Amino acid sequence: MRQPWNVFVYLYRTSNTGNQYLLLKRKDDGIWQGAAGGGEEGETIYDAAIREMFEETGASGIKLIKLDTISYMEKILFADYEKWGNDVLVVPMYYFAAEYNGDIKISEEHTKYDWLNYDEAMEKLYWHDNKTALWELSTRLNNT
């Protein structure tokens, strides 16, 4: 069994009021986050991020930016963690972002989505590492 890993993608757009970030509300636990999911056998991290972004938002044909943020989650947060054996204790999460101005079509994993400014998005995010990645993205966008 290979080491499991996850990817996370923030879509963003620029409006006349500043940058906006897409958050999705998960159906299972009600937590707001970006597009996220596990890598599949044979995928690169980048390919998994492209796939998850498309599956969860309908966004396609855009280039992802790799963020420096990497986090780790306890394996017990995943439904199928028992099949990973005793050697896997934490699962790495790799963060990406992409500018996107098209339509959003959410997956069945989510109940709704919203484009939010930085402060609104930070308020809705639950996980600290998601906030760190959003801070990194916002800082990069504001420094260019």
Image (cartoon, grey):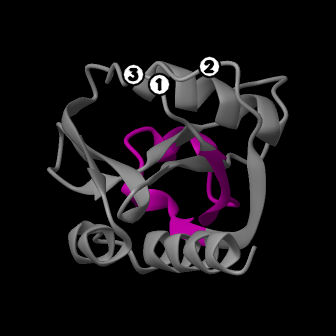
Residue found 68% across the figure and 29% down from its top: 50
Circle 2: element type = loop
The residue singled out by tag 3 in the image is 103
Question: Residue 57 bears which disc, if any?
Answer: none
Q: Position of residue 69 (x, y in %)?
A: 69, 72
Q: Amino acid at mark 3?
A: Asp
Q: Quadrant of the N terminus?
A: top right
Tell me which corner region of the image, top left, top right, bottom left or bottom right, holds residue 20.
bottom left
In this rendering, position of residue 102 left or right of residue 127:
right
Distance Cα–Cα, label 3 vs label 2 = 10 Å
Distance Cα–Cα, label 1 vs label 2 = 9 Å
Question: Residue 102 bears which disc, if any?
Answer: 1
Q: Quadrant of the C terminus?
A: bottom right
Tell me which corner region of the image, top left, top right, bottom left or bottom right, holds residue 116.
bottom left
Q: Amino acid at mark 1?
A: Gly
In the figure, 134 relative to 16: above or below? below
Query: Do callouts 3 and 1 mark residues in contact (Cβ within 8 Å)?
Result: yes
Q: Position of residue 8 (x, y in %)?
A: 56, 50
Queried whether the magenta region covers residue 47, the answer comes back as no
> 11 and 51: which one is in front?
11
In this rendering, position of residue 131 left or right of residue 28:
right
Range drawn in magenta: 72-98
Query: Do callouts 1 and 2 mark residues in contact (Cβ within 8 Å)?
Result: no
Question: Residue 60 bears which disc, if any?
Answer: 2
Q: Which one is closest to the eye, mark 3 or mark 2? A: 3
